[in-house]
Image: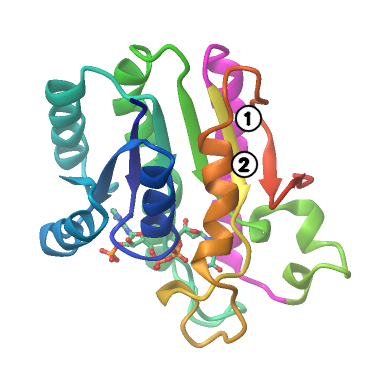
């Protein structure tokens, strides 16, 4: 049985990823910072729950200990938890707002991945999927044919560009792992409340699930959108 942890899985793309991976036969741990929201989602989906706030060392360490005691290893880590700066443009951006977004989207991935490495090393085929965004792709945000080039999300875009570099650097540092990033697509979740037109989570989670189940011959250090690679 493949043992999988999805962070920020009490709702949105993370929750749907958990649902689809359970259908694929994975034993899924839903990581959520709220015990109430996380337990409710886990009960609905038939998952396990671990309290996990990606900004908090103690909660991340406790979550890994709980998985270690129960499973002895981790096969797949999906770094999904994320925050955005919801107003486009420079107004409203502050050092504090940037710190909050980077603490979750960037340092959160480092904190969770570092804590998970010993457990992932117990897996025959360790996999890490970082849920990023095309708003962090230099190619997409400078390509007039891409919708991401028509908005400026200064902090969020920069944080997701950092997620790209984390993906490439972790892939190089851990050649026995598969470490890839995905752009799930513009999706109707609480994250995009106020921006109509997002697609359903069922569709967006598919690319996350595909990279989470990539297998021993799959790529590493790559960035995917639906069925194709996305330029960095
Ligand atoms: N929606 C899109 O169009 C879109 C597009 C590209 C990329 N993405 C990326 O997809 C991922 C999921 O986004 P979503 O659209 O599903 O958003 P969402 O519905 O708002 O879900 C975000 C999840 O992250 C969790 N989270 C936030 N801060 C956390 C923390 N410190 N510790 C643990 N969990 C935390 C939230 O928990 P709470 O319920 O406790 O807040 C929630 O479960 C994000 O990384 C986002 O950047 C989304």
The quarter of the displayed image where residue 122 is located:
top left
Front residue of this view, candidates 3 and 187:
3
Report whether 36 appears left or right of 205: left
Q: Is residue 81 visible?
A: no
Q: Quick one: quadrant of the C terminus? A: top right
131 vs 70: above or below: below
Circle 2 packing at 10 Å, graded few (<14), some (14-19), many (20+), is many
* Residue 18: x %, y % from top left: 37, 50
The quarter of the displayed image where residue 133 is located:
bottom right
169 within the magenta span: yes
Residues rendered magenta in the picture: 151-177
Disc 2 C-beta below 8 A from ligand 1: no
**Residue bearing the label numbered 1:** 168
Report whether 144 appears left or right of 80: right
* Residue 115: x %, y % from top left: 29, 27
Counting labels gives 2
Front residue of this view, candidates 144 and 201:
201
**Residue bearing the label numbered 2:** 164
Per the model, the C-alpha gap separating discs 2 and 1 is 6 Å
Location of ligand 1 given as a quarter of the image: bottom left
207 vs 101: above or below: above
Circle 1 packing at 10 Å, graded few (<14), some (14-19), many (20+), is some
Q: Quick one: quadrant of the N terminus? A: top left
Residue at position x 12%, y 22% in the image: 69
Front residue of this view, candidates 28 and 54:
28
């Amino acid at each position: 049985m493949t043992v999988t942890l999805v962070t920020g899985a009490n709702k949105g793309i993370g929750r749907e990823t958990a649902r689809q991976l359970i259908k694929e036969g994975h034993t899924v741990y839903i990581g959520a910072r709220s015990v109430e929201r996380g337990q409710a989602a886990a009960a609905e989906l038939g998952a396990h729950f671990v309290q996990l706030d990606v900004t908090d060392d103690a909660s991340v360490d406790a979550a890994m200990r709980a998985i270690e005691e129960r499973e002895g290893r981790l096969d797949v880590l999906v770094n999904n938890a994320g925050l955005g700066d919801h107003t486009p443009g420079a107004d409203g951006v502050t050092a504090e707002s940037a710190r909050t977004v980077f603490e979750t989207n960037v340092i959160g991935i480092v904190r969770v991945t570092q804590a998970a490495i010993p457990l992932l090393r117990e897996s025959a085929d360790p996999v890490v999927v970082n849920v990023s965004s095309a708003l962090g792709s230099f190619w997409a945000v400078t390509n007039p044919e891409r919708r991401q080039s028509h908005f400026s999300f200064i902090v969020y875009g920069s944080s997701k560009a950092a997620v790209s570099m984390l993906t490439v650097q972790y892939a190089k540092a851990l050649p026995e792992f598969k470490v890839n990033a995905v752009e799930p697509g513009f999706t109707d979740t609480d994250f995009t409340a106020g921006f109509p037109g997002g697609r359903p989570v069922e569709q967006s989670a598919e690319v996350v699930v595909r990279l989470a189940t990539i297998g021993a011959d799959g790529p590493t250090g790559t960035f995917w959108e639906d069925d194709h690679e996305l330029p960095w």
